[in-house]
Amino acid sequence: MSPMICPTPQTIMAWNHDGTLLATASAKGTVIRVHRPLPATATGGGGGSGGAAAAAAPRPQSFRRGAASAAVQSLAFSPAGLPGGVQLLCASSSRGTVHVYRVAVSWWAGTQGSSWLR
């Protein structure tokens, strides 16, 4: 099974500035995931299961938007060049709320360290 497959339907997606991270929101709107897709060269050129390279892809980083269902209306990553290489993700919902999450730099940079920063 590909690590990019989500267990529930996704309703909205957003790429970061350089296309290395993909944020998705579940149809229920309670979970937002950040995926780090592997380049086509790392997965054998696109198509197929991806073999060992796909198996080595990191698990998506998950954030909880809330317990009550809501349509996630927008997702946006922060621009490049924030101090300390910080990467933020902003989500707005049909409930009139805005959530800002800090994506763990050590997670998407492929280094060791904490997987979840909030």
Image (cartoon, grey):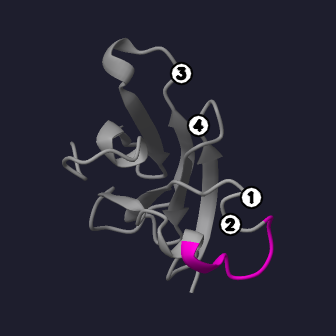
In this rendering, the answer to whether 29 lies above or below 89 is below
In this rendering, the answer to whether 5 lies above or below 78 is below
Task: Choose between 74 and 63: the one closer to the eye.
Answer: 63
Q: Amino acid at mark 2?
A: Thr
Query: Mark 1 or mark 4: which is in front?
Result: 1
Q: Amino acid at mark 4?
A: Asn
Q: Quadrant of residue 89?
A: top left
Span of residues in magenta: 45-52
Where residue 108 sits in the image (x, y, percent)?
42, 45
Q: Which residue is mark 4?
A: 16
Precedes in sequence: disc 1 or disc 4:
4
Q: Secondary structure at mark 4?
A: loop
Q: Are marks 1 and 2 in contact (CB under 8 Å)?
A: yes
Whether residue 74 sits left or right of residue 67 in the image: it is: right
Q: How many angstroms separate mark 2 from mark 4 (CA)? A: 20 Å
Q: Which residue is mark 2?
A: 43
Q: Amino acid at mark 1?
A: Ala
Precedes in sequence: disc 1 or disc 3:
1
Report if residue 66 is visible in the image. yes
Label 1: few (<14), some (14–19) or many (≥20) C-alpha neighbours in 10 Å: few
Q: How many angstroms separate mark 1 from mark 2 (CA)? A: 5 Å
Q: Which residue is mark 3?
A: 79
Q: Secondary structure at mark 2?
A: loop
Q: How many marks?
A: 4
Answer whether residue 88 is magenta in the image.
no
Answer whether residue 46 is magenta in the image.
yes
Q: Which mark is residue 40?
A: 1
